[in-house]
Image (cartoon, rainbow, N blue to C red):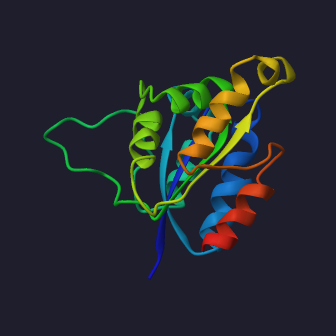
Amino acid sequence: MTRVLGLITSGAGGVERWFRTGLAVPAVERGWRLAVTLTPTAARWLDEAGELGPLAELTDLPVRWTSRLPSEPKPHPPPDCFVFAPATANSVVKLALGISDNQALTVLCEALGLPDVPVVVQPQSNEAQRRHPAWAGHLATLRSAGVLVVPEGGPEPVLAELDRLG
């Protein structure tokens, strides 16, 4: 049986160049069915780069970045695992605080309340953001909720976790 991966990304620098080829395609090659959700900024960047169409072709599910209407069915089945990569500092903070002000964060905030559903987050932040006095606390909050925070620096740490979970 194919496992469903809730694959989520935000508008972190470079995402438009490597998200599909470096993370989404290898996840599919590992046997995952993708349920892709984007932050609004990531959707704009991937659209501008011509990546939305090729990304949608990897899955039989819609690529989401807006909420559905109450009359519409849920477009994605429940994922067996969630990956948020890359996750901007802004999105990491919002997730740690439970702020779900876009579809991607809504999905992730709900995921933190699901028992036995792994959530992997790969932050992408700059040195100044990591020096902020609240940064370590936000990461600690996510870890205390069971989130696996993997190192920054490309898709390899995320793919290694997918191999472990798959």
Is 127 positioned to the left or the right of 58 in the image? right
Indicate the quadrant containing the C terminus: top left, top right, bottom left or bottom right: bottom right
Residue 86 in picture, x, y percent from top left: 68, 40
Q: Quadrant of residue 142?
A: top right
Query: Image point 48% across, 61% down: which residue?
Result: 59
Q: Is residue 71 above or below residue 54?
A: above
Q: Is residue 38 above or below residue 128?
A: below
Q: Looking at the image, how many numbered discs can be counted on the residues?
A: 0
Query: Image point 59% across, 26% down: which residue?
Result: 93
Q: Quadrant of residue 47?
A: top right
Task: Return the residue nearer the eye: 161 or 159.
Answer: 161
Q: Is residue 10 above or below residue 101?
A: below
Indicate the quadrant containing the N terminus: top left, top right, bottom left or bottom right: bottom left
Q: Quadrant of residue 46?
A: top right
Residue 108 in picture, x, y percent from top left: 46, 42
Task: Return the residue nearer the eye: 11 or 143.
Answer: 143
Is 134 positioned to the left or the right of 117 in the image? right
| Residue at the extreme left of the image, as rendered | 71
Query: Image point 79% across, 47% down: which residue?
Result: 151
Query: Image point 73% across, 29% down: which residue?
Result: 136
Task: Return the residue nearer the eye: 93 or 83.
Answer: 93
| Residue at the extreme bottom of the image, as rendered | 1
Residue 125 in picture, x, y percent from top left: 77, 28
Q: Is residue 49 visible?
A: no
Q: Is residue 8 visible?
A: yes
